[in-house]
Image (cartoon, rainbow, N blue to C red):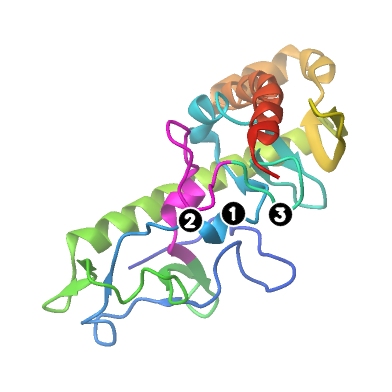
Amino acid sequence: MSTTPSKSEPAEASAGLPLFYQQPRPLIAERDAELSIGAIDDLGFAAGTNSLPVVGAELPVACKHFPILFTTGPEPAMVALLGLRSGENLFVDAAGAWAPGVYMPAYLRRYPFIFMENSERGELTLCLDMAASCVGKAGNRLFEAGEPTDFTKAALDFCREYQSHFAFTADFITALREADLLVDNRADITMADGQKLSLGGFQVIDEARFNSLSAETFLDWRQRGWLPMVYCHLISTGNWAGLIDRAGARPA
């Protein structure tokens, strides 16, 4: 259950692992013959993050629900903003349930599976986070008679597709940087109760600079399929008001 790598996902600086993943390891039929996974009915583990990575294929839907931003640093990532404060996810309630009717980013839907790079073989291998609460519970078997079950094959296909979209999105972000279209931004917010919040450490696409791209570059981006991502990002800025309303309605 491996594939040739393209681009790898950014790791958490503190742990050296992607967000949420604590003990990922490759799936091996001989070792994991009896392993099963139950449903993830508690997303409490995601309640403490105010953003999640998103890929370009998600933007037509995600841009209707969240502000889409870019992180700062040498390798920016594209993220959906989920909260106005650090450690706050306004879309996961106290019971660990995702907000009804709101799009759930693929990064979260993929969990506890992930592709991770095998440096010795130069390939990506399907891994499972053994620390996930759903691992070992009654539910979906991962292997039958030494072969991956349909459930495992579906997880492999999902991760493979996600990896492809991630690489496509990474190329888009590289182009944004090379064209000098990403600019630092901040949001200064006054809540209905008078509380003032300030959110920084993110970047947005400068619309004026984007509109000044040469005709040659614009056509090249259209052929590469990058223009819809720019427009979805710009459209998503209209979701700040909804995020503020959601924060104001949440009990302190």
Counting from the top left corner in percent of width and height, residue 43 is at 48, 56
Compared with residue 248, is residue 153 higher up or lower down, i.e. above or below? Answer: below
Element carrying mark 2: loop
Q: Could you tell me which residue is drawn at 48 percent across and 39 percent down? A: 99
Quadrant placement of the C terminus: top right
Tags 3 and 2 in contact by the CB under 8 Å rule? no
Compared with residue 65, is residue 112 higher up or lower down, i.e. above or below? Answer: below
Q: Which residue reaches farthest left?
A: 145
Q: Mark 1 points at which residue?
A: 47
- The CA distance from mark 2 to mark 1 is 7 Å
Q: What residue type is labelled 2?
A: Leu
Side of 189 relative to 32 (left or right): right
- The CA distance from mark 3 to mark 2 is 14 Å
Counting from the top left corner in percent of width and height, residue 55 is at 55, 40
Q: Name the residue under label 3.
A: 87
Principal secondary structure, stretch drawn in magenta:
loop
Compared with residue 176, is residue 116 higher up or lower down, i.e. above or below? Answer: below
Tags 2 and 1 in contact by the CB under 8 Å rule? yes
Q: In this picture, which residue range is highlighted in magenta?
A: 91-115
In magenta segment, residue 95: yes
Q: Mark 2 points at which residue?
A: 43
- The CA distance from mark 1 to mark 3 is 7 Å
Other residues around mark 2 within 10 Å, as few (<14) / some (14–19) / many (≥20): some
Counting from the top left corner in percent of width and height, residue 85 is at 76, 45
Q: Could you tell me which residue is drawn at 76 percent across and 51 percent down? A: 86
Other residues around mark 1 within 10 Å, as few (<14) / some (14–19) / many (≥20): many
* Residue 28 in sight: yes
Other residues around mark 3 within 10 Å, as few (<14) / some (14–19) / many (≥20): some
